[in-house]
Amino acid sequence: MKVSIIGAGGLVGSCAAFALQTGKVVREIALLDLNAEAAEGQALDLLHGGPSVADQVITAGGYEHVADSDVICITAGLRRKPDESRLDLINRNVDLFLGILQQIEAVGMKEGAIVMVVSNPVDVLTYLAYERLRLPTCKVIGLGTQLDTIRFRSFIAQELGVPPTQTSALILGEHGESMVPIWSSATVAGLPLEQYPGWTPAMASQLFKRTKGSGAEVIKKKGGAGFAVGIAIQDVIESIALDSRRILPVSSVQTGCYGIRDVSLSVATVVGRCGVVDTHEIDLWPKEVQGIRKSGQVLRQTIDTVMQRVGAAT
């Protein structure tokens, strides 16, 4: 499998490339960036580590790589400011994103290729990619709340002093202000979280608040998130490459889950070689369902504004 990463000269793209290299699943990784020298430098750095990791082809170049890629991962985008919401990024990032989509259209995509959107605001741009590239809904996947979910699990595990890999909990809905914590199915080692020794309702509020603000926290402390984003991207691409059909909280255009249609957001999604294999309307508490539907309404309003702006521009 060949993966092209657009925006690979930056922090998120380079961390995604490194995670894919250490994951040892994909055969070829192509790094693309407006700053060609930065992409070449990242590719060279990865190439040096190859003998100790995996037999992969690591290259840097232009959009010609997109034409024969199985997954086109778009990470390019302007960074979010510490006090800026993800949705506030929309006016600054849409023009950049449209330019990338035009380049993809110009070189063409191989049959069955999947577009994975990481750039923020990811749900809005995932929908825009679906609209502009005229692909089936199953072929456009946004990173969605996969990153929020692993952050969420890490904080729960840290608070309780339990292994992170044995902690299961989901964030669904928007990758942004209206994200929804799914406490109804949260577990530690298979035990319901609310029954786990030491767990209190106060912890729930505190941990979700930290999860929600963790992107801004990382930006403030080190300038931007990288490692965890790279791992989250690797989670999704590995499930595609191996046809693992893992259930992941990724963003895709909804066609009726929880009564939501024509908007991109995260629900429990089966991810495999063909992209979105299925979505599951898992049984949730009523307030959780209400929260996901509210996410859909918030995003629909933003998408409408974006599509009107994009339409006016063209």
Image (cartoon, rainbow, N blue to C red):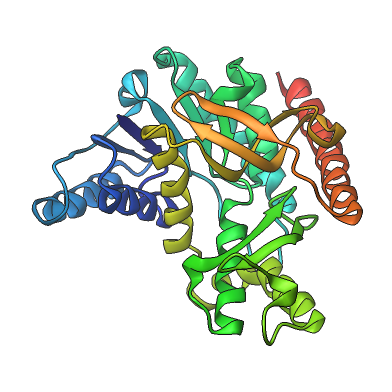
Quadrant of the frame with the N terminus: top left
Q: Which of 81 and 6 is in front in this view?
A: 6
Depicted 233 relative to depicted 237: above or below: below
Residue 270 picture quarter: top right
Residue 116, x across and y down, in percent: 51, 35
Q: Which residue is drawn at 80% across and 41% down?
A: 299
Quadrant of the frame with the C terminus: top right
Depicted 187 relative to depicted 116: above or below: below
Q: Which of 299 and 309 is in front in this view?
A: 299
Q: Residue at x 22, y 46 (%)?
A: 43
Q: Is residue 131 left or right of residue 31?
A: right
Residue 142, x across and y down, in percent: 59, 39
Q: Residue at x 58, y 17 (%)?
A: 135
Residue 13, x across and y down, in percent: 40, 49
Q: Which of 25 and 101 is in front in this view?
A: 25
Q: How many labels does the image show?
A: 0
Quick one: which residue is furthest to the left in this view? 51
Q: In this view, does 19 lie to the left or right of 285?
A: left
Residue 176 picture quarter: bottom right
Residue 273, x across and y down, in percent: 44, 27
Q: Nearer the viewer, residue 145 or 273?
A: 273
Depicted 141 relative to depicted 85: above or below: above
Residue 55 picture quarter: top left
Q: Is residue 31 left or right of residue 6?
A: left
